[in-house]
Image: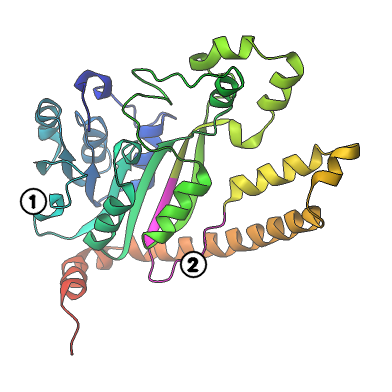
């Protein structure tokens, strides 16, 4: 999955605002973490030293794995596209699965998510990040009739799947997770990676594209929890985009919109606010339980119960 170790070997400031620092904060303290695609162990080191977590690292690149070894309780060399990778893991309960910019490299990210879900017990969490293919810089490149693969960045040539907030959230729900938190790493629409393409756009197009809500995030971060019936995914970022598009319709453009779209957008926004309030309240209550000492003490028992085959 990783062809050049040095690209993913870096030091991570746990107090910073980088994607890695944000992901570690979402994982939290004193968790048993399975880090998929741990690379050289930058995040593993922070999780162990700063958050007191026990980390099991899975990585395909042998050199990267050796660099990560000092920060992990166990390291496993495996290809996440090989369905047998979970069989190599130690038989210990896992609280959180971490996948930082990993899913876009996999042939079958959905299958990997299903396997990750099966490794987690009730209340288990997934923390994941992916590049945002809807970033305005990518759109600027497309408007210039180009889609420039590179060695790093949003269009890294090793990316074989592309995600928006809607497609990522929907896939997590289909895999048996309930998204409980979403945040974005916003670098602005005119990212240096796509600077040349912005120069080829008219000023009015640049202004319009720079103001598009979906186009500002460079990366999408989601925290999800194991759920028996996750239901449909509600994409808050997509709702912002719909509202923004509706506000920018003027004159004859409004005739293009389906009848009642403005009302539909308002209904969706109201529903999102109510759902977010309920989710925040539920998350606070559940976090108080799952972070408690009694919850950690009983983790092995819950894991054994979850692995026991059903009767009859």
Give SS at disc 1: helix
Highlighted magenta segment, given as a residue range: 222-234
Task: Out of 116 and 146, give the one closest to the viewer.
Answer: 146
**Residue 173, above or below 161:** below
Tell me if residue 134 is in the magenta stretch. Answer: no
**Residue 4, above or below 117:** above
| Residue 255 visible within the image | yes
Which residue is tagged 2?
231
Which residue is tagged 1?
88
- Seen as rendered, the residue at the extreme right is 251
First in sequence, mark 2 or 1: give its number. 1
Task: Please give the name of the residue rendered at 21% of the width and 44% of the height, measured from the top-left corner.
Answer: 81
Image coordinates of residue 238 in percent, x first then y, are: 61, 46
The quarter of the rendered structure image containing the C terminus is: bottom left
Give SS at disc 2: loop
Image coordinates of residue 221 in percent, x first then y, are: 44, 42
Mark 2 to mark 1 CA distance (whole Å): 32 Å
């Amino acid at each position: 999955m990783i062809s050049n170790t040095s690209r993913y070997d870096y030091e991570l400031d746990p107090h910073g605002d980088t994607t890695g620092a944000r992901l570690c904060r979402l994982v939290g303290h004193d968790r048993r973490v399975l880090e998929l695609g741990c690379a050289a162990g930058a995040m593993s080191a922070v999780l162990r030293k700063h958050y007191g977590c026990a980390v099991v690292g899975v990585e395909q690149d042998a050199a990267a794995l050796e660099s990560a070894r000092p920060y992990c309780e166990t390291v496993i060399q495996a290809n996440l596209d090989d369905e047998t990778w979970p069989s190599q893991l130690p038989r210990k309960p896992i609280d959180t699965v971490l996948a930082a910019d990993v899913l876009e490299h996999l042939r079958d990210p959905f299958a990997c998510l299903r396997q990750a879900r099966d490794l987690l017990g009730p209340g288990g969490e997934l923390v994941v990040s992916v590049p945002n293919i809807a970033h305005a810089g990518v759109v600027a490149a497309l408007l210039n009739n180009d889609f420039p693969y590179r060695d790093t960045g949003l269009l890294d040539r090793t990316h074989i799947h592309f995600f928006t907030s809607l497609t990522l959230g929907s896939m997590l729900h289909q895999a048996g997770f309930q998204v409980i938190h979403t945040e974005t790493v916003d670098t602005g629409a005119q990212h240096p990676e796509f600077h040349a393409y912005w120069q080829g756009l008219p000023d009015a197009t640049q202004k319009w594209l720079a103001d598009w809500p979906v186009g500002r995030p460079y990366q999408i971060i989601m925290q999800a929890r194991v759920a028996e019936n996750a239901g449909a995914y509600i994409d808050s970022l997509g709702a912002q985009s719909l509202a923004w598009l509706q506000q920018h319709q003027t004159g004859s453009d409004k005739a293009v919109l389906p009848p009642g779209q403005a009302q539909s957008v308002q209904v969706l926004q109201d529903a999102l606010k109510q759902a977010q309030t309920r989710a925040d309240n539920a998350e606070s209550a559940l976090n108080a339980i799952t972070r408690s000492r009694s919850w950690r003490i009983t983790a092995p028992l819950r894991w054994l119960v979850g692995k026991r085959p059903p009767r009859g």
